[in-house]
Each structure stands twice: as C-alpha cells, then as structure tokens.
Image (spheres, grey):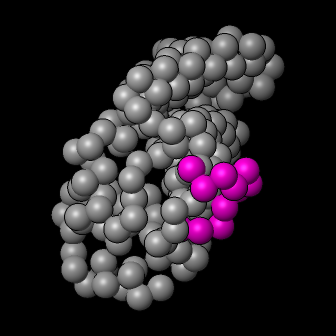
Amino acid sequence: MSSESENIEASSSGSYLKPILLCAATGLAMTFFLRVSGRVWWCKLGDWAIYVNQAWNSSHTSQHVFDPYTFTHVLHGVLGFWIANTAFKKWSFAAKIALVAAVEAAWEILENSNFIIEKYRENTASLDYFGDSIANANGDLIACVVGFLIASKLGMWRSLAFFVAVEIALLIWIRDGFLLNVLMLIYPLDWIKNWQMAM
C-alpha cells in the first residue's frame, strides 16, 4: 500500500479531533498576532455578509469571511498536501495538516504586513487593498484546511486536475488565481495588470 493511500485511510478511519484542535490552536495564535498588529475584526463598512462576491475595486474584498479569493486559499491547501505528503511521508495525518495550517497562518501574518500590502498595491490590480480583516484571515485558514482535506481524498493526480480546474475557473471569473497572484507579486507584468483592471 502506498504512503498516500495509507494517509487517506488514516484520515478516513481515525479521529479528526487532534487535527481539529491543532488547526484551531493555530487559528487562535494567528488571530492574536493579527489583532496585536492592528488588523480589524470585520469589514469596517458594517456589512455582516459572510460571503461577498467582489474581487476588484471594492472595500469589501478581504474584509468578510469568504470572497472569490477564498478559492486560492483552497489551492494553498492542495499544494500543502502535495508538499507534506512528499517531504514528510512518515508523518501522521494530524502532523501534516497541522504543518500546512501553521504555514498558512504564517503567510496570513506576513501577507498583512505593511511591506506585502504595499507590494500588492504596487504590483497588482488590487489598488484598494489594505490587508485582510481577522475574519477573512480565519476564512482563508479554513479554506486552506479544506483544500488539504480535498486533496487527501482525491489523491495526487485527481487533486492536480482539481487544482487546474479551479485555476482556470478563477482566471475566467475574476481574471486572477493562485499562480497569477504569485507571479504578479514577485514579477509584475503591465499587460496582465491592465487586463485585470479592465474587468
């Protein structure tokens, strides 16, 4: 039996209590750091919607629990599953998912630093981006964990197909995606930025 199928079996038949507790503890630690660094709890506009369907030029994007960018964080979890399952084959399911959640939480803290916020505003079409609310950061963490679980059920190749399908859907829907977001953050291209802003 392959390590991947063993991992899937363990996650299916074993208790989810330990992974849930580890991920919840990670979320609490992330929330503490974000709050201390001055992040707001929720959208300042007072709209209590859990999900907003706005990706560009909106003061609501990244301020509610979920938005179109939530799907990029699902893909973080898929990628995390691939890396954890390849680099840490002998680790337990709980340890792998806890590691991926911790990396995602660390990214959320870094993403909400002034340096990264300014990079997003300079390099991408997210001109109105001022960082995430704490609610949105926790929504992103949940999405990442969901992505990990999806990949653990689908396995390596089917989760790759899932990854590609979500990326294509995001490119059509919001002219952005996980890979494009990374590219524009590291190596911005004016023609892509113009294409995104024309939406």
Choose top left, top right, bottom left or bottom right for residue 186: bottom left
Q: Position of residue 31 (x, y in %)?
A: 52, 25
**Furthest residue toward right:** 13
- Is residue 133 part of the magenta span, yes or no? no
Q: Is residue 125 above or below residue 47?
A: below
- Is residue 53 part of the magenta span, yes or no? yes
Q: Is residue 29 above or below residue 162?
A: above
Q: Position of residue 147 (x, y in %)?
A: 61, 43
Assign the magenta stretch its main secondary structure.
Answer: loop
Q: Please name the residue shown 53% across and 48% down the image.
A: 73
Q: Is residue 126 above or below residue 99?
A: below
Query: Seen in the image, is 146 located left or right of residue 179?
Result: right
Query: Seen in the image, is 86 located left or right of residue 172?
Result: left
Q: Position of residue 85 (x, y in %)?
A: 49, 30
Q: Please name the residue shown 37% across and 29% down the image.
A: 37
Of residues 131 and 166, the one drawn nearer to the viewer in this rendering: 131
Query: Seen in the image, is 54 located left or right of residue 83?
Result: right
Q: Please name the residue shown 56% across and 19% down the image.
A: 28
Choose top left, top right, bottom left or bottom right for residue 4: top right
Q: Is residue 103 visible?
A: no
- What's the magenta region? 44-55
Choose top left, top right, bottom left or bottom right for residue 11: top right
- Screen quadrant of the N terminus: top right
Of residues 83 and 23, the one drawn nearer to the viewer in this rendering: 23
Q: Is residue 82 above or below residue 127?
A: above
Q: Position of residue 185 (x, y in %)?
A: 27, 58
Q: Is residue 149 visible?
A: yes
Q: Give the total of numbered labels.
A: 0
